[in-house]
Image (cartoon, rainbow, N blue to C red):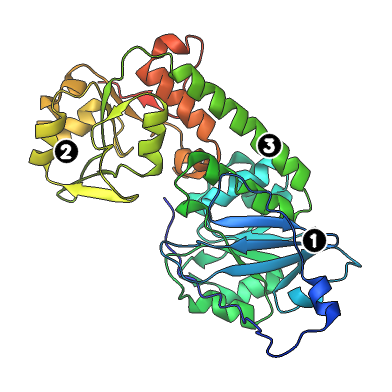
Amino acid sequence: MKSCIRLLGLLVLIVGFGCQSDRSRSERPQGQNTVRYATGFTLQNYQDVTVITVKNPWPEARQTYRYVLYKKGARIPDSLQQLPAIRIPIQKIVVTSTTHIPSLEMLKKVPSLVGFPQLHYISSTQVQARIAKGKIAELGKNQTLNIERLITLQPDVVIGYGIDNHNPTLDNLQSSGIKVLLNGDWNEQNPLGRAEWIKFFGALYDEQAKAAQVFTKIEKDYLNTKRIATRARYKPTVMAGDVFEGQWYLPKGDSWGSLLLKEAQGQYLWGATKGTGSLALSFETVFEKAQNADLWITSGQFQTLRDMAAQNPHYRQFKAFQNQKVYSFHRKKGKNSGSLYYELAPNRPELVLKDLVKILHPELLPSYQPYFFMPLQP
């Protein structure tokens, strides 16, 4: 999962008082947003520049962050001069979440990645190959990035994410002249909204058309699978999660995972709860409601049903366990045991949806082989 990194990227907003010249009025851009599903950012193209606005980099964020992207020789309008400016296409990048990696892969920009915190979390075979060759620098932990090493790399941009507006490390980077852009993909709840953040990276590489093409294919496959799922005659009941440190954690009803189960025509037993985080319940509460659930999607911490029962013998009392209808994404791991699901799934919701439809309604996708989810074996 993403390790949390707290960011501070306060943009200085210049407010003009008094009269404005006709020239400044005429230069105020009026671009159209090209983002359709994502709520956390907009992408607006003008004659010479592109403006990225990040509106929701963390839950309940009050700040809005704007960045202007420009090509060599482009003239930035006076009305945008106060924004952080990044010349595109960028050549070197540092990202701080494994969920950023798939966008670089799909855009064929992996060689531009020069640094990452905690390299062992990366599952991508392409990136691991470059790590083995010493092409990507280890930058420590997200909360305490190795600033000296990062500055030595001289990346064109550092892509950060956070849970609030305070991170002295990235603030220091900006003071050193390093461009820091916030990315809030993890805060999107709409599956296609998360995937659409590839357009954020496409703009940085001056590859907007390519990013749009990649996303359109994901969107088409997702919507087609969603239509197929509506043919289901029955909605199986689904339970989720498992016990961790004495509490049973499972997704709330408005979360990304809950929505995907709904799109797959599953009856998630906690689908009516409000919120986008996780519920923390007692074993007894879950057992009372989910004892007879048809299917069980676990958190991914177990390798086999035997492993589950060894941790908690009471798992055997669930109908889904008894019928061997317990599913996990644990088998897809990177070289150093990083989870491919956590890295790739947010960027490829069409694969997750297909997996869930296959699990819930195998007759609807008879030839499909699940990509992430597999049933736990005894």
**Mark 3 / mark 1, whichever is N-terminal:** 1
Q: Amino acid at mark 2?
A: Gln
Left or right of 286? Residue 355 is right
Q: Nearer the viewer, residue 317 or 152?
A: 317
Residue at image location 31% in from the left, 14% down from the top: 234
Q: Where residue 185 sits: x, y (%)? A: 52, 52
Q: Report which quarter residue 310 is drawn in.
A: top left
**Mark 3 / mark 2, whichever is N-terminal:** 3
* Residue identifier under label 2: 311
Q: Is residue 91 visible?
A: yes
Residue 145 in the image: above or below residue 193: below
Quote the CA–CA distance across marks 3 and 2.
42 Å
Quote the CA–CA distance across marks 2 and 1.
52 Å
Left or right of 243? Residue 118 is right
Q: Amino acid at mark 3?
A: Val
* Residue identifier under label 3: 214
* Labels 3, 2: front one: 3
* Residue identifier under label 1: 88
Residue at image location 51% in from the left, 35% down from the top: 349
**Mark 2 / mark 1, whichever is N-terminal:** 1
Q: Amino acid at mark 1?
A: Ile
